[in-house]
Image (cartoon, rainbow, N blue to C red):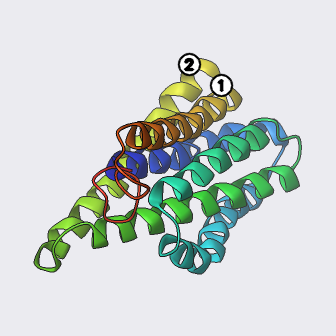
């Protein structure tokens, strides 16, 4: 489940790439200002990397993924409603932060979920989920943008965040009903989220 969430959040985060020219046209941005949107995404990732690393060792992945999913939904709504460069920059920074939280949490969960002698294979699974999401995202954003426009495409991508929240909360509830304990299915090294 961790790999699926890493894939989903990555796809949603990267779906905005082909939408940037239409966003720029709509907000009357220069090419340089559109470039700043990508810089803001990278800055969000950079600013969240260290805190996410600390968080990954103290909370279950499902908790971090709920925060990331909710943050993705909020950031997507902010970006879709953008009327100015500042608003779009804030949304891009938040999307970058959500991406870093997801990536670091997923990496930690994969690295600690198996035997030490299988860690390389585990990390390859993580990077595959991440890269597949980064590959699928632009195709998703381009298709949605062509069908519904950039604002609707961003909102639809944000719905992925809501789906992540629902999956994580439902997974936790199912584990608790099964009497599996607080860490089973949702904790670091657990079989699920």
Q: Can you say whether 188 is above or below 146 in the image? A: below
Q: List the residue tagged with mark 1.
A: 149
Residue 111: x percent and y percent? 29, 72
Residue 124: x percent and y percent? 22, 65
Residue 147: x percent and y percent? 56, 18
Residue at x 67%, y 26% (from the top left corner): 152
Residue 150: x percent and y percent? 66, 31
* Most foreground residue, 124 or 20: 124
Q: Can you say whether 101 is above or below 82 in the image? A: below
* Most foreground residue, 123 or 110: 110
**Quarter-wise, where is residue 122 in the image?**
bottom left
Seen as rendered, the residue at the extreme left is 117
Q: Can you say whether 35 is above or below 133 in the image? A: below
Residue at x 46%, y 44% (from the top left corner): 172
Is residue 179 left or right of 105 when viewed as pictured? left
CB of mark 2 within 8 Å of CB of mark 1?
A: no
**Which numbered tag is attached to residue 119?**
none
Q: Can you say whether 187 is above or below 117 in the image? A: above
Seen as rendered, the residue at the extreme front is 179
Q: List the residue tagged with mark 2.
A: 147
Q: Which element carries disc 1, helix, strand or loop?
A: loop
Residue at x 67%, y 50% (from the top left corner): 71
* Most foreground residue, 39 or 166: 166
Cα distance in 3D space between marks 2 and 1: 6 Å
How packed is label 2: few (under 14 Cα within 10 Å), some, or many (20 or more)?
few
Q: Which element carries disc 2, helix, strand or loop?
A: helix
């Amino acid at each position: 489940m961790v790999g699926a969430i890493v894939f989903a959040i990555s796809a949603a985060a990267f779906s905005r790439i082909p939408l940037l020219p239409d966003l720029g046209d709509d907000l009357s941005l220069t090419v340089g200002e559109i470039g700043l949107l990508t810089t803001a995404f990278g800055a969000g990732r950079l600013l969240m990397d260290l805190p996410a690393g600390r968080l990954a060792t103290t909370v279950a992945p499902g908790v971090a993924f709920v925060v990331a999913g909710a943050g993705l939904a909020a950031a997507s709504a902010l970006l879709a409603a953008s009327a100015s460069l500042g608003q779009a920059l804030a949304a891009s920074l938040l999307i970058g932060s959500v991406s870093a939280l997801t990536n670091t949490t997923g990496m930690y969960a994969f690295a600690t979920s198996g035997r030490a002698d299988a860690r390389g294979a585990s990390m390859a699974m993580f990077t595959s989920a991440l890269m597949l999401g980064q590959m699928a995202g632009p195709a998703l954003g381009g298709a949605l943008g062509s069908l519904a426009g950039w604002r609707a495409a961003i909102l639809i991508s944000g719905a992925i965040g809501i789906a992540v929240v629902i999956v994580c909360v439902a997974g936790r509830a199912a584990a608790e009903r099964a009497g599996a304990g607080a860490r089973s299915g949702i904790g670091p090294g657990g079989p699920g989220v």
